Amino acid sequence: MDNNRELIEAGAVLRELRKQTGLSVHKVGNKIGISGGYIAKIERGENNPSDAVLVALAELYQKDEEELFRLY
């Protein structure tokens, strides 16, 4: 499978989770200690999040870490 397509699809899942929380990319970034711009790049499939970012997002979105790791 095309890696870029996988990143875009994974990012779309993360975007949907964020929207369900009602938070902006900047608020998510502030809560987990990274920039909102970086969150936006992850959601667009332009960046691959680190393990630490995925763990923080799982906690913030109240999801199982493994669920988010399987996306990548």
Image: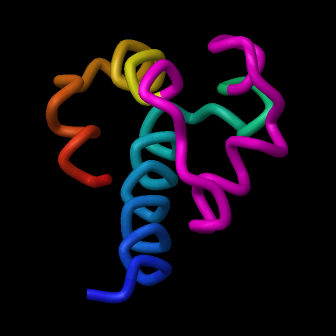
Quadrant location, the N terminus: bottom left
Does the magenta-highlighted stretch encompass residue 37?
yes
Residue under the point 71% across and 56% down: 41
Q: Quadrant of residue 67?
A: top left
Q: Which residues are magenta?
A: 29-53
Is residue 52 depicted above or below 11 in this figure?
A: above
Is residue 32 shown left or right of residue 21? right
Query: Where does residue 63 sit, x and y in percent of width and height?
Result: 24, 25
Residue under the point 72% across and 52% down: 40
Query: Where does residue 57 sit, x and y in percent of width and height?
Result: 45, 25
Q: Main secondary structure of the magenta part?
A: helix
Is residue 54 depicted above or below 44 in this figure?
A: above
Query: Where does residue 49 sit, x and y in percent of width and height?
Result: 53, 41
Residue under the point 40% across and 43% down: 17
Q: Quadrant of residue 34?
A: top right
Is residue 53 shown left or right of residue 68? right
Residue under the point 64% across and 56% down: 47
| Residue in the foreground of this view, choosing between 55 and 21 | 55
Query: Where does residue 71 sit, x and y in percent of width and height?
Result: 27, 53
Query: In the image as oriented, which residue stretches furthest toward the bottom?
Result: 2
Does the magenta-highlighted stretch encompass residue 27?
no
Is residue 8 depicted above or below 57 in this figure?
A: below
Is residue 14 shown left or right of residue 38? left
